[in-house]
Image (tube, rainbow, N blue to C red):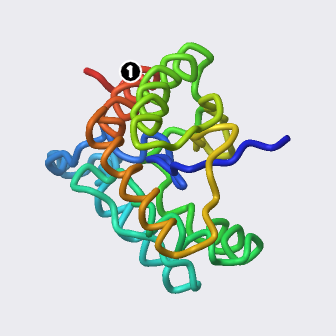
Amino acid sequence: MGARFLFALPLVTVAAGCGGSHAAEPPPATPAPGSLAAPVTHLNPYEAAVAYARCMRARGVPHPDPDANGDFHLTPAQDKAMQSVPRKQHEAADAACFHLLKGTVSTQPLSRGARQAALVPLGEVRQCMLGFGYRLGKPVVKNMSRGRAMFGFQYAPQPKSAKAREKIQGAQHACEKRVKLAAKIDAIIKADRGENR
């Protein structure tokens, strides 16, 4: 049985490590007259992520803007909107736009240790959701293409009515905030990618 993902987190669904240690730096010193050295370009992860999001939206994918660090964090509503786009359209848009993130994201998959560590805060969310009356399957962390990862559960309730969906989304949001899920996942990813310097 395939995993059902209730949560879509930073990583884009989540692009793992979209920002991080590549902070904008001041421009390099001008090369001495007659020098063959070319100026070094430093990329700003926030600006790159904004350009990526705009590019995706221009291709019909309602991609949200990043946070101030250039990281993407999708709310349940944003995740739902993005999932409403046909997969082929989403993939084509990503293929056309991903070049805008090059040099600002790590495309390395999460290590086994990082995937294991991410199961802990997901387990906390699972326990919290139980307090709201929702039983979720086992936590799952799955590497995807280009350094992205999916964080979720083997099973998540799929309510049919809009009112029931709103209720579970409210519980999900409350649990994510309560356990500080986004901050914990970000810290795990940054530690795995060596961005905690």
Q: Is 15 situated left or right of 128 in this image? A: right
| Mark 1 Cα-neighbour bin, 10 Å: few <14, some 14–19, many ≥20 | some
Q: Residue at x 62, y 51 (%)?
A: 157
Residue 140 sits in quarter: top right
Q: Is 28 situated left or right of 185 in this image? A: left
Q: Residue at x 62, y 17 (%)?
A: 112
| Badge 1 amino acid | Ala
The one of 55 and 183 positioned closer to us in this rendering: 183
- Coordinates of residue 6 in the picture (x, y in percent): 56, 50
- Relative vertical location of residue 70 with respect to residue 16 in this rendering, above or below: below
The one of 39 and 195 positioned closer to us in this rendering: 195
- Relative vertical location of residue 10 with respect to residue 106 in this rendering, above or below: below
The one of 170 and 10 positioned closer to us in this rendering: 170
Q: Which residue is mark 1?
A: 191
**Residue closest to the far right:** 1
Asked whether residue 41 appears in the rendered view, the answer is: no
Q: Is 72 situated left or right of 32 in this image? A: right
- Relative vertical location of residue 98 with respect to residue 135 in this rendering, above or below: below
- Coordinates of residue 66 in the picture (x, y in percent): 33, 60
Placement of the C terminus among the 4 image quadrants: top left
Placement of the N terminus among the 4 image quadrants: top right
Residue 142 sits in quarter: top right
Q: Residue at x 57, y 85 (%)?
A: 60
- Coordinates of residue 153 in the picture (x, y in percent): 62, 38
Which element carries disc 1, helix, strand or loop? helix
Q: Residue at x 57, y 23 (%)?
A: 115
